[in-house]
Structure formats: C-alpha cells, structure tokens
Amino acid sequence: MRQYKFILSGGGTGGHIYPAIAIANELKSRFPDAEFLFVGAKDKMEMQKVPQAGYKIIGLWIAGLQRRLTFDNTLFPIKLISSLLKSRTIISQFKPDVVIGTGGFASGPLLQIATIAGVPTVIQEQNSYPGITNKLLSKNVDKICVAYENLERFFPKNKMILTGNPVRQDLIDIDSKRDEAIHHFNLDSEKKTVLVLGGSLGARRVNQLIAKEILAFSAQNIQVIWQCGKLYFEDYKRYGDNENIQVFSFIDRMDLVYAAADIVISRAGASSVSELCIVGKPVIFIPSPNVAEDHQTKNAQAVVDKKGAILIKENELDTQFNTVFNDLVLNEIVQKELSENIKKLAKVNATKEIVDEIIKLIK
C-alpha cells in the first residue's frame, strides 16, 4: 500500500482544533504509515495543541477581520496574500492526497489553494450556523460533512453529508473510568461533583456566576471542577483554596473529568454539545450570546427540544440559576431522564463516517 498524505487545517478555538485532531487520529488508525501535516494560524492555540497531540504544524500569518476598524484590519489584505502564497508552497511541496478543513481562518487560504490545485477537499462544519470561512469555501470543495440538518441555505445540497461532529474516542466508555477519575482529581466519592466548562478560552459571564455561587455550593456539600479558561485563570485561581473547588485554565483529561462529573454546566459550542451527548450527564447549557447568529443558543435548543438538557440564557442567570440548579441537584429522577434523553442524540460514529467520506476521495 502506498503512503498517503493528509493535510488538516482548522483552529483559533478548541471547537475547530479538536475535531481536526479526532479526524487525524482516525485516519492514522486506518493508515499507520500515512504522513500528516496540520496548518494553523500563527500565535493561536493550535500551535501548542497540535504538537501535543503528536502532529507537525505550520503556521500561517492570518487572522479574521475585526467587526470594528482596527490596525489589524488594514493588514488583512497583506496577511491574506502572504497566507495564499505560503499555502501554495505547502501544497506543492507536501503533495497531499486530501486536504481537510474544520473551520477557522487558517483553513480558508489553504483549502482555496488546494481546490485550485485540483487536490480533493473536505470541510467539516460543526455548528447549526456555519462560520464565514466554510461558507466561502463550500462552493469549491468536494464534500461538506455537517452535524445539523437543514443547512441547504448555506451549502450546496449535493455536497452535504450528515455525519455529526467528530469527538475524542476516549469519551465513548467513560462509565468504566469513574474510579480512576475520582482518584485523578482527588475527589470525595460521597459528594456530588459539578463540572463547569466555559470553552477553551473561558466565559466571562459563567465565571462571574460560579464565583458568586461558591459559598452556596460548599454549603450544599458539592465539589466543583471549574475550567475557567486561560483568559481568566489569574482572576479566579484563588477560589481553588477552597477544599471543594478546583480551578483549571484548561483540562487535558476530558475523559476523566466527564467520568467524575454528576452534573455539567457548560457553554453550547458545537463540539461541547456533541461531546456531552456522548457523555450522557445532566447538563445546564448557558449559551454565549456573543457568537454569529446566536448559534450556541440554537445548538443548545436542539437538545432541549428533545428533553435532553436545560437551557438558561445569560440575561436570566440572576433570576433563574439558583432555582433551576437546586431543583436539578435535588431531583434524581430528572437527572436520570436528562441523561437518557441526551444520550439518544449522540452520534458515536461521526469520526468514522467522516473518515469514510475522506477515503472515498483518495484517487
């Protein structure tokens, strides 16, 4: 068998990076001799996370357009031309069999050049409302793997395949890891554990809420694992002095933290929603209102409509959180119902199905 070559590009946030890594891992399991190259944006988190996952990455000098007039915006045309030229060099030197994009600005120039060069291309869209990069690329790529139905208004219908979002395979059997998880995080197995997830960068409003509720959690004998994000870690790390609270900027062992959790409070980014469906724990979603077309609310609502989670909007936290949270903690029947219903929405084979589509494109 000849040695295949794959380029993957996606980044800026964990929501673009981890799907790309999950796809690469599945490809590697099928083609152990294949060669992989990631392309990201210089100075973004993929430049650390991808090498940690064992893959080589090249950075492009690219960033998105800001919504307001800034100096960075004046540099955008220069950055774009620079990234297109560098992408052309990468494609011509590496000679990939397929190029895969998972969203984020770096994937734009690279996949554009790949389509011009006649290299087979696939994009994977995680959200119910697609990002600008994937919308622009969709006209020219060969296939579009999507996680939500009814995206015909954004993408050509004949190119779309409904696969779900790629997730880490180590999340599929977390129940067997419960004891290991309790030990890993040094938790008290007699206490309820609440996991708070604000996304890879953090969520300001969620962090403010948790800081305000710390004493109430302690009074209820609840232990908290709080991923506050790297932007906010310095502001909130002092809360970790409380024996019932652990504060992290980032959590590497997501399989174990999900296994330890009894209840999850989370943003509703597409990857998080997909993971939480597989994990099957009771969830309170607090969607970010600061994203394009309010897509986090739409992501969460799709689960809530199937009675698989609870949704509280940011502007309702002060009036609703205490009541909703206390009702959930005290009601084991509701916890069980939410767990069972969210698990029904899991697309466990998404990564495998995406890779099946990629393989069909190999000449």
Image (cartoon, helix red, strand yellow):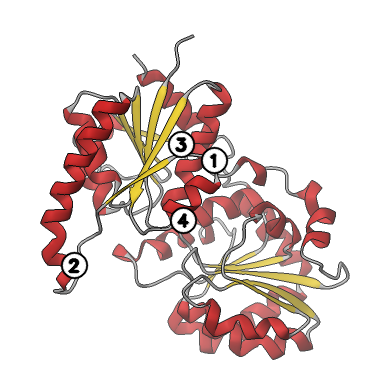
In the image, 193 versus 321, the foreground residue is 193
Q: Which residue: 66% across, 55% down?
A: 253
Quarter-wise, where is residue 219 in the image? bottom right
Residue at which label 1 appears: 54
- Badge 1 or badge 3: first in the primary sequence: 1
Name the residue rendered at 67%, 86% in the picture: 214
Q: Are marks 1 and 2 in contact (CB under 8 Å)?
A: no
Q: Quadrant of the C terminus?
A: top left
Task: Specify which label sits upstream in the sequence, 2 or 4.
Answer: 4
Residue 158: x %, y % from top left: 27, 29
- Label disc, if present, on residue 14 of the rendered structure: 4
Type of the residue with mark 2: Asp
Q: Residues within 10 Å of mark 1 (few under 14, many from 20)?
A: few
Give the residue displayed 32% in from the left and 27% down from the top.
Answer: 94
Numbered circle sitting on residue 33: none
Mark 1 secondary-structure assignment: loop
Q: Is residue 361 left or right of residue 278?
A: left
